[in-house]
Image (cartoon, coloured by chain):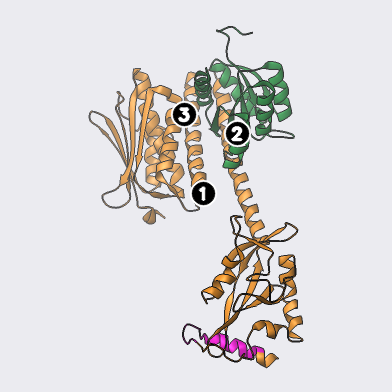
Chain colours: A green, B orange
């Protein structure tokens, strides 16, 4: 179990390599530990089960079958880990579907990693 | 037969209405009492069935008196003549999918109000559960005295057109998604370059470029939210762009945005976002350099001679923005873009720094 001073552990689901790289580096710079960057819904669930992060940053469109919404719901049901959705299509239908994952927050693409980092800090403080 | 048909058209074309000359109660049935009788005439029936369009008629009380084959296909059933009322369809839905009672359908309106209805929109629900959106064109029919004797309706299947519209919407959403994703990618590529360089100067220059890309992205978001093809609401736009520009500075900046009701032309979005970004960034940077917090007020108001005035005011210390020979960043960029949109930018420094951008009238700029 991580101690109080351990960095907050974050799972990232993002199928774009460069964006994933940037998230990993940017979040690490902001003091988080990225436990993994999943490219697919399936991979995200596997990583969440293995790593039990504090939260997941989920892109909606992912590689392969299933999307970020389905993955977030599965992850929430299996582990109780909730997600921040980072997406370019924040429409009503997607938001309604995502409600079952009890999203922590939404951030619209394109966004700055620093903004995401602050958002993570804020939602974790609120949840505490 | 053909003569009779022509005669009925002439009468209808005469446009005499029941309202204009209310007939006596029991008048002898006219030879064209209903178009249904006509349509059932041998030969004409084949012609109506051969039409690639659904046609049916009713009597004055709305009872179906005739329908052609395409009408039966559209309805997915065979209505009972003289019994079924108002419409050949099994069930009707409004365009939003809510149930539409038959006695409120376009044909019912045409008969009850004795007026032609054009492009009445509805969805036919067939007994097998399938749906077809259509447009209805019911027209009341009158006898020679002007009395309402029934109506004829034409139903136009618009499912293909609606499917095309849905495809277009999906394409638009997809395109917009790709633009945003590509901007995120651009942001990530610049971010990676920033991290990999050893040079502080290069890092700062890239950070500025990231900021400008983000401001453009915010403008794109505002345009998409507006969803109009020619203009956008200034209020949402200002809030989104200013927030994006101020975000990297976190709590060093308190932002307030106000805008009069204004619709700005789409061409204005990107230059305006970039100008705002330079001004907001400059103020925030002065505050950060001095280690203080700054309040930045952005306000869009109508100009004294038409057009708009965009004021960006801040209480951050330090020298106000000045053109330093650079034209692709800072005030140099803002001045160039202001000229591009046909406006002018002035910087005033009193107790606060105030930048005023005059924006020409959107109509004049177009």
Local crowd size for mark 2, using a 10 Å CA cut-off: few (<14), some (14–19), many (≥20):
few
Residue B178 in magenta stretch: no
Q: Return the residue at label 1.
A: B227
Per the image, label 1 sits on a secondary structure element best described as loop
Q: Quadrant of residue A35?
A: top right
Give the label, 1 or 2, closer to the camera. 2
Q: Return the residue at label 2.
A: A99
Q: Quadrant of residue B7?
A: bottom right
Q: Return the residue at label 3.
A: B208
Between A8 and B321, which is closer to the camera in this rendering?
A8
> Can residue B206 be spotted in the picture?
yes
Residue drawn at (64%, 34%) of the image: A60
Could you tell which of marks 1 and 3 lies nearer the N-terminus? 3
Instruction: Find the distance from the CA under tag 1 to the CA under tag 2.
Output: 25 Å
Residue B5 pos. (x, y %)? 66, 88
Residue drawn at (33%, 27%) of the image: B295
Between B111 and B320, which is closer to the camera in this rendering?
B111
Label count reads: 3
Q: Are marks 1 and 3 on the same chain?
A: yes
**Looking at the image, do the residues carrying marks 3 and 2 touch, with CB atoms under 8 Å apart?**
no
Residue B209 pos. (x, y %)? 49, 31
Residue drawn at (51%, 74%) of the image: B113
Per the image, label 2 sits on a secondary structure element best described as helix
Residue reaching furthest to the left: B350
Instruction: Find the distance from the CA under tag 3 to the CA under tag 2.
Output: 37 Å
**Subunit under mark 2:** A
Q: In the rendered view, tell whether residue A109 sits above or below residue A83.
A: below
Which segment did they paint magenta?
B5-22
Residue A127 pos. (x, y %)? 53, 20
> Can residue B325 be spotted in the picture?
no
């Amino acid at each position: 179990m991580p101690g109080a001073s351990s960095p907050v552990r974050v799972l990232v689901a993002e199928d774009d390599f460069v964006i994933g790289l940037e998230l990993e580096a940017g979040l690490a710079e902001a003091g988080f530990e990225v436990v993994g960057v999943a490219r697919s819904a399936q991979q995200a669930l596997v990583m969440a089960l293995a790593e039990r992060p504090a939260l997941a940053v989920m892109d909606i469109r992912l590689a392969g079958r299933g999307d970020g919404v389905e993955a977030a719901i599965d992850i929430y049901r299996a582990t109780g880990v909730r997600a921040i959705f980072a997406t370019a299509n924040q429409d009503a239908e997607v938001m309604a579907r995502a409600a079952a994952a009890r999203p922590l927050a939404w951030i619209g693409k394109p966004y700055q990693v620093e903004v995401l980092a602050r958002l993570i800090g804020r939602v974790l403080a609120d949840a505490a | 037969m053909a003569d009779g048909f022509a005669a009925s058209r002439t009468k209808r074309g005469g446009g005499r209405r029941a309202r204009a000359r209310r007939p006596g109660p029991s008048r002898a049935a006219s030879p064209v009492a209903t178009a249904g009788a006509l349509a059932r005439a041998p030969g004409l029936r084949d012609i109506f069935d051969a039409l690639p369009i659904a046609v049916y008629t009713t009597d004055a009380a709305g009872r179906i008196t005739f329908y052609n084959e395409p009408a039966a296909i559209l309805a997915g059933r065979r209505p009972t003549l003289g019994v079924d009322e108002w419409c050949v369809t099994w069930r009707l839905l409004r365009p939003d999918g809510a149930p539409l009672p038959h006695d409120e359908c376009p044909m019912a309106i045409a008969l009850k109000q004795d007026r032609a209805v054009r492009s009445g929109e509805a969805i036919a629900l067939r007994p097998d559960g399938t749906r077809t959106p259509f447009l209805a064109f019911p027209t009341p029919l009158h006898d020679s005295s002007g009395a309402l004797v029934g109506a004829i309706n034409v139903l136009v299947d618009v499912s293909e057109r609606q499917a095309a519209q849905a495809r277009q919407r999906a394409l638009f959403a997809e395109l917009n998604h790709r633009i945003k994703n590509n901007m995120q990618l651009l942001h990530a590529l610049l971010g990676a370059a920033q991290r990999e360089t050893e040079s502080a100067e290069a890092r700062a220059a890239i950070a500025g470029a990231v900021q400008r890309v983000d401001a453009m992205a915010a403008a794109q978001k505002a345009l998409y939210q507006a969803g109009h093809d020619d203009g956008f609401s200034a209020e949402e736009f200002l809030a989104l762009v200013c927030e994006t520009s101020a975000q990297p500075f976190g709590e060093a900046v308190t932002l307030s945005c106000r805008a009069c009701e204004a619709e700005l032309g789409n061409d204005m979005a990107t230059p305006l976002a970039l100008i705002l970004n330079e001004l907001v960034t400059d103020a925030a940077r002065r505050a950060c350099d001095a280690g203080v917090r700054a309040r930045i007020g952005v306000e869009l108001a109508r100009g004294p001679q038409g057009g708009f005035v965009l004021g960006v005011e801040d209480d951050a210390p330090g020298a106000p923005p000045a053109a330093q020979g650079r034209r692709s960043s800072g005030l140099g960029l803002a001045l160039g873009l202001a000229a591009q949109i046909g406006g002018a930018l002035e910087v005033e420094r009193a107790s606060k720094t105030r930048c005023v951008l005059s924006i020409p009238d959107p109509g004049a700029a177009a």
